[in-house]
Image: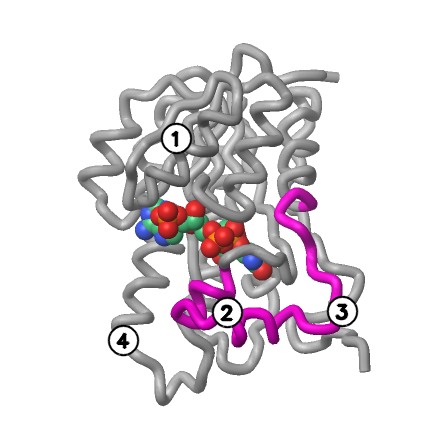
Amino acid sequence: MQATLSGKTALITGASSGIGAATARALSQLGASVILAARRTDRLEALAASLDRASTLALDVRDAAAVRGALESLDLDLVVCNAGLGVGVGPLQEGAPEAWDRMIDTNVKGVLHTLRATLPGLLRKGAGDVVLLGSVAGRQVYPGGNVYNATKHAVRAIYEALRLDAGSRGVRFTTVDPGMVETEFSVVRFGGDQAAADKVYAGMRPLDPEDVADAIAYAVTRPAHVNIGELVIWPTDQSSTRDVRRDA
Ligand SMILES: NC(=O)c1ccc[n+]([C@@H]2O[C@H](COP(=O)([O-])OP(=O)(O)OC[C@H]3O[C@@H](n4cnc5c(N)ncnc54)[C@H](OP(=O)(O)O)[C@@H]3O)[C@@H](O)[C@H]2O)c1
């Protein structure tokens, strides 16, 4: 078994918070050099200062030219496409097109730009890992989640497309699809409304970002001939995207 990631370089998008930051910590602890990418560079600098072999990259994954310019020349072994967000919850017929653009441009096109810039290098090496952060929302829709759900269904389709277009060439592809994880996700989704975000997790035990990072670390440390393809991780208190057990 490949015990550590020493000598490997990992790019993590959305490393300034939540699952991305926890993944950066986990991969760094396994010996990888980590490149932390996101828009909030102050957060990235603070995280990098606490890790070994960490560097930072100011990056908006929606900006195709910037992504290409920053990532194309990197020598990478692991790419974690994690940057993503939800904007609002509500009926489709009342939705805001600007919110749809933010979600589609980040969650779908941001992943595509990142892959377009990094995958050719991995394929040239004939080795490496691509990890996509999907969601259980890419498997089951829930009321009011329409466009976010659609973006995560798209991530799942991209994962399947990668296997067909670039599979069997030494690079492994993994989609990691968590249920509810307590991060800044809901604060962002509700435009900074902390009380609304807290309500999402009230009376239930969500996943911690470290739980998801642990699963990613598991997938990328299997022997080279083993590709963990799909990881669906639920909080024990959540039985579907619509059903959550909460304290009375
Ligand atoms: N939390 C959950 O319940 C949950 C469940 C399933 C899947 N997910 C998925 O997990 C991923 C991480 O979410 P999280 O829960 O860790 O949320 P989070 O704490 O809000 O972190 C989101 C990260 O994405 C980055 N990001 C957002 N827009 C970006 C952009 N345009 N360019 C570059 N980076 C951008 C943010 O960095 P900056 O703002 O600094 O750019 C931040 O680092 C997302 O893809 C999300 O859809 C989350």
Q: CA distance from mark 4 to mark 1?
A: 31 Å
Label 3 vs label 1, nearer the camera: 3
Which quadrant does the N terminus fall into?
Answer: top right
Q: Nearer the viewer, residue 192 or 146?
A: 192
Is label 4 in a helix, a strand or a loop?
Answer: helix
**Is disc 1's CB within 8 Å of ligand 1?**
no
Q: Residue 32 at what x, y percent from top left?
A: 54, 19
Q: CA distance from mark 3 to mark 4?
A: 31 Å
Q: Residue at x 65, y 71 (%)?
A: 241
In terms of image quadrants, where is residue 218? top right
- Please give the label number shown on residue 119: 1
Q: CA distance from mark 3 to mark 1?
A: 35 Å
Q: Which residues are magenta?
A: 185-211
Relative to residue 24, is residue 151 depicted above or below? below
Q: Residue at x 80, y 76 (%)?
A: 247
Is label 1 in a helix, a strand or a loop?
Answer: helix
Q: Is residue 63 left or right of residue 121?
A: left
Is label 2 in a helix, a strand or a loop?
Answer: helix
For label 3, the residue is 239
Q: Residue at x 42, y 21 (%)?
A: 76
Q: Is residue 87 left or right of residue 129?
A: left
- Please give the label number shown on residue 66: none
Magenta residue check for 204: yes
Label 2 with label 1: CB-CB less than 8 Å: no
For label 2, the residue is 194
Query: Given the image, on which type of amino acid does mark 1 rest?
Result: Leu
Q: CA distance from mark 4 to mark 2?
A: 24 Å
For label 4, the residue is 97
